[in-house]
Amino acid sequence: MPEKCRVVVCGFDPMLVKAYAAANMRACWWHISDELFEEFDIQPGAKVSGQLLKIYSGKDGQECAAPNEAFEWETAKETGLVVLIPSDVIIKYELTEFHFLEMLIEKIDGKKVYPGEEKISKKMWPEKMMKLDYVLDYVAG
């Protein structure tokens, strides 16, 4: 069974996210669990694949989308700890640093994650902490 995680999206100010996403540059990312990073010795440019299950808004901590779609994203060129969210995904779901992603991590560079096991990541952001005190909206257009 893959690793299930709920992570906070990291990124720039929404105005910069708009420009960077439009230019297909790094705008938003998330951090993979230390356990997976160490166990799989994840390198820069590695492919991380799985299922994007849910997206939560930091405004109210509630689910705002349930894509339940497969993904294959790359880690940053500097470190395998940071997984980059592609621009088309950012634009499609209007993601900012004020969102949370719930995912199943199924493979890293083609290797199955915890085959035959079921694991909940230590990177499971608590639901009671998903309502943020300060948020900015995605800047469309």
Image (cartoon, rainbow, N blue to C red):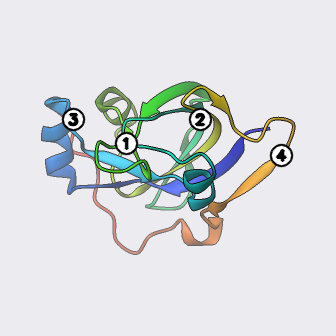
**Mark 1 vs mark 3: which is more N-terminal?**
3
- Taking the spot 70% from the left edge, 38% from the top edge, the residue there is 113
**Mark 3 vs mark 4: which is more N-terminal?**
3
Disc 1 to disc 3, how far (Cα)?
A: 21 Å
Q: Which residue is mark 2?
A: 66
Could you say whether the residue bearing mark 4 is in a helix, strand or loop? loop
Nearest to viewer (mark 3 / mark 4): 4
Nearest to viewer (mark 1 / mark 2): 1
Disc 2 to disc 3, how far (Cα)?
A: 21 Å
Nearest to viewer (mark 2 / mark 3): 3
Compared across the picture, whether 13 is left or right of 55 comes to: left
| Residue type, label 4 | Glu
**Mark 1 vs mark 2: which is more N-terminal?**
1
**Residue 21, numbered label:** 3
Could you say whether the residue bearing mark 2 is in a helix, strand or loop? loop
Residue 97 pos. (x, y %): 34, 56
Could you say whether the residue bearing mark 1 is in a helix, strand or loop? loop
**Mark 2 vs mark 3: which is more N-terminal?**
3
| Residue type, label 3 | Ala
| Residue type, label 2 | Ala
Residue 104 pos. (x, y %): 66, 39
Residue 74 pos. (x, y %): 40, 34
10 Å neighbourhood of mark 4: few (<14), some, or many (≥20)?
few
10 Å neighbourhood of mark 2: few (<14), some, or many (≥20)?
few
Q: Which residue is mark 4?
A: 118
